């Protein structure tokens, strides 16, 4: 059983939480906590033995916590996701392989693409693929068509696995902090389009990738995971892009694992991540 709590910090929170669990005879397997002294916030993730009545446990925890607390008791760690794609395959195939071998900590409900090229790989892994073309229609209609498909499936998160369309604020507000994107640069550097071309022209010695939650501000959402690798003068823009795809795949996989394991807390535009 996983318990995650975020609230205003105050003296005695750990003792109060542990007391509730002890009174219910729940054994704590591990506890990770963090107190942000600047914003006066408290974050805790607890792994504990199973308990029959999760709703009642939440209520008992709320009784001993500050009024602004959010508590989630998550007895089932496996999440459900929908993946959005365009043409690039590297992140999608990694997700599909992990999904097939049940190492994703989530189940892929379907894949939605605005180009047909990745339909075949989804069929090979027996994952439903839905084509929603953005061509010759308005952005509003395009997003409505995607939403009609999304609503057919239960899902916890939407993953943008190299989905190369900017989503409207009307779309995003329906999935607040539930859309995860992989960006092909070490944000905030080289945001927007053609980051490898930008990096090559700048003559950088490091390139990277960033996984983040999506907000209305393009590529400015709370960062979940980042990684960099060295490059040098011998790298062309194409070579940088090839190396970048490998790091994009690794960073997205790491970010998804952290989120699916309930190790990521969002506050304002930052994250607390219990690795």
Image (spheres, rainbow, N blue to C red):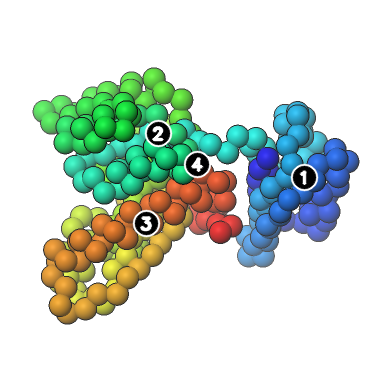
Q: Nearer the viewer, mark 2 or mark 1?
A: 2
User: Looking at the picture, how far across and down is residue 221, in whole percent?
Assistant: 41, 52
Residue 105: assigned label: 4
**Residue assigned mark 3:** 250
Spatial distance from mark 3 to mark 1, Cα to Cα? 37 Å
Residue 10: assigned label: none
**Residue assigned mark 2:** 108
Counting residues from the N terminus, which is met first, the one under dot 4 or under dot 1? 1
Which secondary structure, mark 4? loop
User: Looking at the picture, how far across and down is residue 162, in whole percent?
Assistant: 27, 46
Q: Can you name the residue that lies furthest to the left here?
A: 136
Which secondary structure, mark 3? helix
Residue 65: assigned label: 1
User: Looking at the picture, how far across and down is residue 22, in whole percent?
Assistant: 86, 45
Which secondary structure, mark 1? loop
Report whether residue 13 is seen. Answer: yes
Spatial distance from mark 4 to mark 2, Cα to Cα? 10 Å
Counting residues from the N terminus, which is met first, the one under dot 2 or under dot 1? 1
Spatial distance from mark 3 to mark 2, Cα to Cα? 18 Å
């Amino acid at each position: 059983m996983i318990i995650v709590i975020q609230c205003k910090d105050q003296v005695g929170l750990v003792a109060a939480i542990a007391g509730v669990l002890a009174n219910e005879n729940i054994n704590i397997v591990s506890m990770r906590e963090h107190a942000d002294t600047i914003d006066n916030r408290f974050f805790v993730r607890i792994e504990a033995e199973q308990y029959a009545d999760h709703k009642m446990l939440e209520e008992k925890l709320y009784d001993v916590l500050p009024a602004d607390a959010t508590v989630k008791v998550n007895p089932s760690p496996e999440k459900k996701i929908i993946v959005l794609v365009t043409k690039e395959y590297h992140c999608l195939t990694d997700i599909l392989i992990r999904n097939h071998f049940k190492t994703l900590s989530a189940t892929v409900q379907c894949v939605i693409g605005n180009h047909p090229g990745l339909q075949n790989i989804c069929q090979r892994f027996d994952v439903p693929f839905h084509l929603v073309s953005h061509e010759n229609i308005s952005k509003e209609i395009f997003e409505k068509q995607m939403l009609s498909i999304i609503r057919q499936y239960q899902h916890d998160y939407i993953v943008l696995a190299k989905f190369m369309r900017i989503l409207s604020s009307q779309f995003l507000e329906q999935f607040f902090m539930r859309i995860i994107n992989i960006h092909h640069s070490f944000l905030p550097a080289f945001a927007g389009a053609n980051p490898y071309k930008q990096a090559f022209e700048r003559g950088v010695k490091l390139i990277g990738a960033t996984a983040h939650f999506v907000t209305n501000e393009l590529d400015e959402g709370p960062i979940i995971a980042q990684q960099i690798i060295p490059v040098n003068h011998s790298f062309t823009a194409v070579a940088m892009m090839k190396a970048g795809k490998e790091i994009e795949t690794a960073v997205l996989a790491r970010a998804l694992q952290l989120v699916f394991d309930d190790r990521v807390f969002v506050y304002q535009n930052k994250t607390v991540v219990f690795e």
